[in-house]
Amino acid sequence: MNAIFCAAAVGRQPHRQRLTVAGYDVELASLAVDQHDGSEPAAARALAEDLAAIRLGTDRRDLRIAPLAPSGRPVLLVAGRVAGIAVSLSHVAGLVAAAVATSPGVGVDLVDPAEAGRGLDFWLTPEELALEPDEGLLRARLWAAKEAAYKAAGLDEELRPRTVSIESLGLHTFTWSARSSFTTAAGAGRFLSTGRHVVAVAVAASRAEAHASTEASAASGATTIHPLESALA
């Protein structure tokens, strides 16, 4: 069974949890950051690089994660070359998340329900809002799922929320589809919680076409890598 290593930070001492998303094993770890010093982006990157080094059995000093323009999708580089595994990052104040997948596209996202109000309704469809009763977490769950799915889809375009559809929504699971001008993707996801935050982890059932496009761009020198600070949060 393929493995996905995912980390969602919640405490100074790592807490690990395993779950399965669409047939893929997921390992969760947790760690907190100081919400007053702006260290979340660097902490998310370090978390992902640690997980990637463990997964690949390589020296962490040989790894670097950089964002792919224009989407900001993080790309794992090993000795300066694009690695054959996917990574995903997310961070909010005091909390970071990272995911590393061996094969499919993967996405992770963190949402504070207090910041997921009705202002998001412009980006949500009536069908999505009708997927379950609104009991205070609906918009946070939908937004976290959309962001995680967008990251897993690897569309390499700026996020347009209406192009990512949440097809079904359960208590702990969701399914999704996404489209761009060049490709489509679909998959499933899981919800977790850490403190007050909603955590969504999405897996693409197949993202071979998007992955092949990234590899081809990297091989041709067309891939644009910018400083990590510009990566999608």
Image (spheres, grey):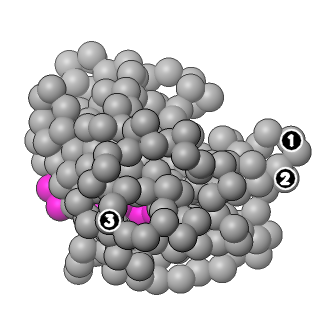
Marks 3 and 2, how far apart at CA: 36 Å
Residue under numbered circle 1: 37
Q: Amino acid at mark 2?
A: Asp
x and y, in percent, of residue 29 in the image: 59, 72
Which secondary structure, mark 1? loop
Q: Nearer the viewer, mark 3 or mark 2?
A: 3
Q: Name the quadrant of the N terminus.
A: bottom left
Q: Is residue 222 positioned above or below 50 on the image?
A: above
Residue at (38%, 32%) from the top-left corner?
159
Q: Is residue 43 positioned above or below 25 on the image?
A: above
Residue at (70%, 71%) from the top-left corner?
195
Contact check, label 1 and label 2, Cβ < 8 Å: yes
Question: Which corner quadrant of the image does residue 68 belong to?
Answer: top left
Provide the residue span drawn in magenta: 199-206
Q: Is residue 201 magenta?
A: yes
Residue under numbered circle 2: 34
Mark 2: few/some/many CA within 10 Å (<14, 14-19, 20+): few
Q: Amino acid at mark 3?
A: Leu
Question: Which corner quadrant of the image does residue 180 belong to?
Answer: top left
Q: Is residue 160 magenta?
A: no
233 or 76, nearer to the observer: 233
Left-right relation of 136 to 127: right
